[in-house]
Amino acid sequence: MTTPALASGRLRRAPRAAIAAVGLVSLVAGSVALSAVSASAADDLPATFLSTGSTWKYSDTNVDPAGGDADRIVWTRAGYDDSAWKSGTGAFGAKNGSPTPNLGSAFPVSTVLNQYIDPNAASKVDVPTFHFRTTFDVTSAQLSEISGLAGTVVYDDAVQVFVNGTKVAGLADDRVNEVPPAQQNLTYAGEGLSDPATSTFQVPAAALQAGTNTIAIALYQDRPTSSDAYLALTSLAPVERETGSTAITDVVLGVGGDESQRMLTWYTSKDTAQVAQFAPAAAVVDGKFPVSAVTVPATGGATTSGEFNRVATLTGLAENTAYVYRVGTDGDWSTVHSFRTRAFEGDFDFLFFGDPQIGSSGNIGRDGDGWADTLDVATSTYPDAELLFSAGDQVEHAANEEEYAAFLAPDALREIPFVATNGNHDVGSKAYEQHFGTPNTDRAAGPGSGASSGGDYWFVHKGVLFIDLNSNSRDYASHEAFVRNVVAEHGDEASWKVVAFHHSIYSAGPHATDSDVKDRRSTWPTLFSELGIDLVLQGHDHSYARTYLLHNGDIANPDEQAGADTVTAGPGGVLYVTSNSASGSKYYDLQPQGFPWLSVANQEKVRNYTAVEVTADAVTVKTLRSQANGDALPVNSVVDQVTLQRATDPNAQRLQVTVPEGAPGEFVWSIDGTNGIVDLGTATEQGDHFAAAGSINPIRVTDTRRSGPNWAVSAQVGDFAAGGTSFSGKYLGWTPKVVEQGAGAIAGDRVGSGFDAGEGLSSSSTLGRADVGHSRGSAKLGADLELKIPVDVTDGTYRATLTLTALS
């Protein structure tokens, strides 16, 4: 590489920029993917992972594959038992129940689907939804070379596509989304296609995993009398990574204030206006970043390294959704990255990592490799982990951007929200604040200085209140005020309360007897017990330690056994855990005398990580080796595991109720069908008038507003005209009806033709309405039309416009 001539203050940044560029195109921790895939690497990528002739398991029996499970997409994930399903190769199809369906030469069928719920019934009804599952393998090396997969699917009438339980595409599935989740696995949907449609979709890298991946497809019929069905996944091709602009580096996906937010940070080489753009991955078509993406302006300023940092917060994210995002400006975008949200309620896992401290060994590359390998092991073992939580000391030297580049190289830091903690090796520069955005940050608490980083922050994730403290500051008054305020405002809504900071106050290594650690140990435990903190996560001492349950710093239960695998906390009982090194850059020996607070201590000088599994009733803290310690202790063998649960009153019963957020919802309506003309046919003479009849195209009304305000849909017709002649619209009348019940819909009154009396539909008339307090949902409104016109009207083909208006 040729290094351009730079001012002496910037020359050091050239090698760092090269490292950052590698990080931007690397997906799997520990792998190195260059900006262009080499010929040998490209040869390892198949043309497609699946094709038309691939084998699938499928269900065509009109049975909901969720089987009553509250999680309606449980069938789209690995581990689902599909052994009773049929097996066949694509393409799949049906046509009028024929054993040899013919949908045309362009749509051959290899496996015939059971089209009807009861094939022997006199009036046959189509199976509404067919379900398909298969798997494909992606190696770690392949995953490191791709930004995702490009799929091509041929279908009739609608499909939803899932990969590893994440919805990556919905094609003509609007009607699926309109019905309650419990009905979405068996419903009619689509647009009544005359021939199967061909569409493309994208599978973002964040939805994939090294090893076996599960793809599932729901194929929907348009109506009970649809004549045919068809599905062929013709390709699932790898998309090689593109090199992003080297002017944009150090992109980090940080945690937001809650599950619906993410904070993005990045560096630029020039002080230009920057934005972040994000969109559902399902909106990516033909590999193009969606024009419908949300754009978020970024803020920031000059960094300590002579660059510029930018911060943008993504809000309004939906649960269980894959997203793509990029940062930069027109013509100078970063690589497109991806992430996925999970359910916003329920159980979850997060990963906790002790001091990576890149550069501490004196070998940045080796430390970075160790850190990347630990991330790879942890995220492969816990592919659904929702947070990457650091104990602090990301780097050895607070202002060293080469160390930061190695720390930030793994793409996991752009795919899973990162939770930063300020360590003693981070605090000495503003670089920590410039690299990591943190939500709800109080810079007055745990203050920094003009040249150092500071601040405490908090966030809530799935009912857990997390509080992260800058333990470098011993301004205990500001820390205490911050923690008390946060717990007072948000503690009651949290099922668990977790505090994290860098300097362990209950460790087993040499720092346990440092004077500053003793100072913190004499101050914080009583505060944490008083405020009902459940778990404290720490680092700093480069060894593993787990305490007994402590109350005000003393052992809460003298009968608790050392190394107990389950502990039950009474009021004020707190569990403290100290993590070992995640990178292997530095280890400390245990102090030989031990300490009274230690239930477990471990130092094998191999890399560790900690998986924290959270449920409503318990928190399990499991520490594992990400590096083998001989044959007897392989990778992912357990160092220590403990489940924390709360004491319960044997004479009490726990009650739980979930109250949904009062979202505003929406009121929408649309005309069903694609025929824009309601043809009343040829009028027939009926004595003193001509008569014709027909029906309007149905109107679908959906109202999801919580308060159930009233609504009404009305219509008015203009004059009928043919060339230079016309007759009044008053001669048209109607009889409204509710075709599909829902949303409290009530049909409007009959309006007779003005030939008999009145103004007919030339005056605005109600098609349908709902009163205040109606239920939420969707309805379909229709009307039978009657036209009576005088016999003296000149012959011709007359047209008029029926104008529909919705009021709410």
Image (cartoon, rainbow, N blue to C red):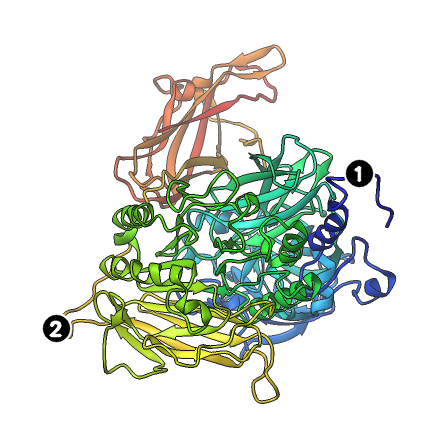
Which quadrant of the figure contains the C terminus?
Answer: top left
Point 74% across, 60% down: residue:
145
Whole-percent x, y for residue 713 in the image = 39, 30
Q: Is residue 578 left or right of residue 795?
A: left
Residue 114 position by quadrant: bottom right
Residue 345 position by quadrant: bottom left
The amino acid pointed to by label 2 is Asn
Label 2 sits on residue? 651
The amino acid pointed to by label 1 is Leu
**Dot 1 crowding, Cα within 10 Å, few <14, some 14–19, many 20+:** few
Label 1 sits on residue? 6
Q: Is residue 639 left or right of residue 26?
A: left
Compared with 203, 628 (above or below) is below
Residue 29 position by quadrant: bottom right
Point 72% across, 40% down: residue:
247
Whole-percent x, y for residue 382 in the image = 53, 69
